[in-house]
Image: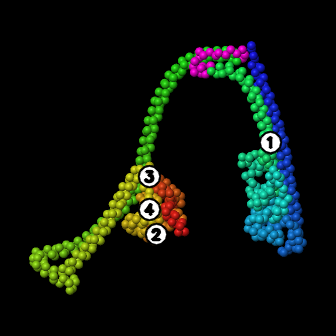
Amino acid sequence: MFVSIRIKILAVLSVLLVTAIFAYLLLADRIFREDKQLLVFDTNRANAERIANDLEISLHRVLDKTEMLSKLILNDRSVGGSALVRDFFNRDAELLLYQLIHVQDSKSKVLRELEDTGHLAALKITSAQIKASGALDFNAAEAKDQVSLENVSLPGAVLYVVRVPIEVKEGKHRLFAQIIIDGHIWLDNFQNQALSLNFAISRSGRLLAHPRAELVLARTDMSRNGLVKIAATHNVNEQQVEFEQDHVAYLGVYQKASIAGITAFSMMAKNAALSASLLLLEKTIVLSVIVVTVVLLISLWFAGSLSRPLRALVRASGEIAKGRFDTRIEVYSRDEIGELAVAFDRMARDLKSSRVQLEDYSRSLEAKVQERTQELESKNVAIREQQDVLVRTTRLAAVGEIAGQAAHEVLNPLTGMIARLEGMSGRLRQFYGARDGGVDMLKIIARGWSTDIESKGVQGWLDTLTGPSRVYPGKMLAEEDLANLARVSVQFDNFGAVLLDDMKLLLDEAFRISRIVDGMRGLSRITSNRGRVDVIELVRDCVRTTEDLLRKNRITIETELVGCAFADLDRDEMRQVLANLIKNGMDAIVERVVGGTRLQEPGKIIVKSHVLGSQIHLLLWDNGMGIPLPDRQKIFEAHFTTKGSEGTGFGLSICRRFVRAAGGELSVHDSEPGKFTEFEVILPLSEEDHEKNITEA
């Protein structure tokens, strides 16, 4: 018996009917929402218009009083003001302070000022506080021929300032009135609805009226409010809009007043406005769940008659998906599903034929892909070779730059070593060349003893030694020789100590050069032998190292250092920085002398230090050539030098890099060309020293 599938579709139609009912309910809900939204817009519009009208009426009332008061004052030019003027001013509870201002040539002058001291005292404020807040500041250059209203509230007192053009001469306003108004009178008439938020702002975007008085007192800037932004960007006096703020949807209306740039706003959260619609939607959903449950139970009965042949189709399709295209579908239903099974068998045969064709095409495509892959591999090899060439070129360039840096960095300790060796050479010549030096004295004593022994024998030599001394009356010659030998011993001890000190310095500088070379070898790596170092002791050590070189160039070095200050840094790098800065100061002084500039005082370098907060500041001053203003930043760039062919342009660049690696900064603190230069090194104190400073403070 043939059963048409259309009979089975009847069950589906029942579901569609239920769905239609549900859709109807949703449509009704939508219409309800739209009507409710229109009602909210009408309510907001009425609120905004009411607020704008109330503010306009209040402002016109103030303007009328101001105009009358100004005319009374203009007719009465007495300094103290007539009784009529004061009575008129004090009779009004709104007016707190009045100023009549004359404007001429972009300059303003207060002609008359009145204040209600009793009312001000009741508000617990004074006119001095109002003036100090800037509420009465009048910019004559920007004065406009229109009324302005602004919120100038003080703590505990809501105040407004109104500026009004009074008198026109030669087409321009020459007289303006400024009035401070008690805003509490205006806020007392301000009402807010349960769901709507109503407020008003001035031309500058600050609150004039709001249900929450504390916001008005704070002169809150409402320019970030979504509705205020829309009003500011649309040149229409009234508009209703739907907008989002802080991920909340709102329905709002704004109304621009016809005076003083006042704009009134009324806004309501969309969810709050449509709460009734949401309740209806919830009930509709509950009803829909019940209906869908009933329909589902009915559909289960109809699904049984459809699922059995469909499962057979699914099993057959699974076999075909595995590549078994000879599978046949055993469905004997005498309806459209049976016809579908026949069509499915036909499709399986067609798929088998198509698969054979695809396999042939795949084999040919695989061959083409392999050919293209080989071409790409050959091109990749060429690209890698070019990359290797580029890397080698880059490394060679880096090696050249590092070599230049190494030469510059090694030059500083090498110069100090040469100066110390020259000093040692001079001291040796002085020691051996002195007439009464220790060597000559030993020669004289040895020659005298040898002559006595050869001519007189040992006993005669002993007799001579026990004879009287011609240098020291009352003493024997042996005592004179022993005194001379003791003096020679002291000279040798002193000279030996000096030589040991010089040799230690030379060894230290040699090891330092070795470390610089090793450091330059790995300059491209971010490595550091950081530790807790006494910066002040490091400065003293560096000063001792460079003293000979400075003395050779007739330059003195002075220090004004604090006791001690520790920082976490690389000792060798920071020593290199200080030595480089001192060497640069020496070069600047020498260059100034060689250039023919006469120094008012001898060449001098001063090193100072002070601790400020969590940092130690080192200042290195010299009275050399100074640095021109355009060169103060360039001197820290690589390859830039002011020494011509003698400089490499790497010294200060490397110094700044070392200082910044320690978390500090190197800069030109001050300089005057032809007079002096002062560099500043700022280093962070170690955590222990910083905590110690805080505890002591």
Point out the image quarter for the C terminus.
Answer: bottom right
Tag 3–tag 1 contact (CB < 8 Å): no
**Sequence-earlier tag: 2 or 3:** 3
Q: Quadrant of residue 450?
A: bottom left
Q: Quadrant of the N terminus?
A: top right
The amino acid beneath tag 3 is Thr
- Pair 1/4: label in front: 1
**Residue picked out by circle 1:** 279
Judging depth in this view, the residue of 177 and 577 nearest the camera is 577
Q: Say which residue appears at 81% left-offset and 53% top-offset.
A: 198
Mark 2 near mark 3, Cβ–Cβ under 8 Å?
no
Q: Which mark is residue 533?
A: 4
Amino acid beneath label 2: Gly
Name of the residue lying farthest toward the right: 84
For label 2, the residue is: 563
Gap between marks 1 and 4, in whole Å?
A: 74 Å
Neighbour class for label 4 at 10 Å: few (<14), some, many (≥20)?
some
Mark 2 neighbour class, 10 Å CA radius: few under 14, some 14 to 19, many 20 or more: few
Q: Is residue 418 visible?
A: no
Residue 490, position in %: x, y? Answer: 27, 74
Spatial CA span between label 2 and label 4: 14 Å
Q: CA distance from mark 2 to mark 3?
A: 30 Å
The residue under label 3 is: 527
Image-quadrant location for residue 354: top right
Q: Which residues are magenta?
A: 316-336
For the residues bearing labels 2 and 1, Cβ distance under 8 angstroms: no
Local crowd size for mark 1, using a 10 Å CA cut-off: few (<14), some (14–19), many (≥20)? few
Disc 3 to disc 1, C-alpha distance: 69 Å
The answer to whether 143 is drawn above or below residue 561 in the figure is above
Mark sitting on residue 53: none
Say which element carries label 1. Answer: helix
Q: Main secondary structure of the magenta part?
A: loop
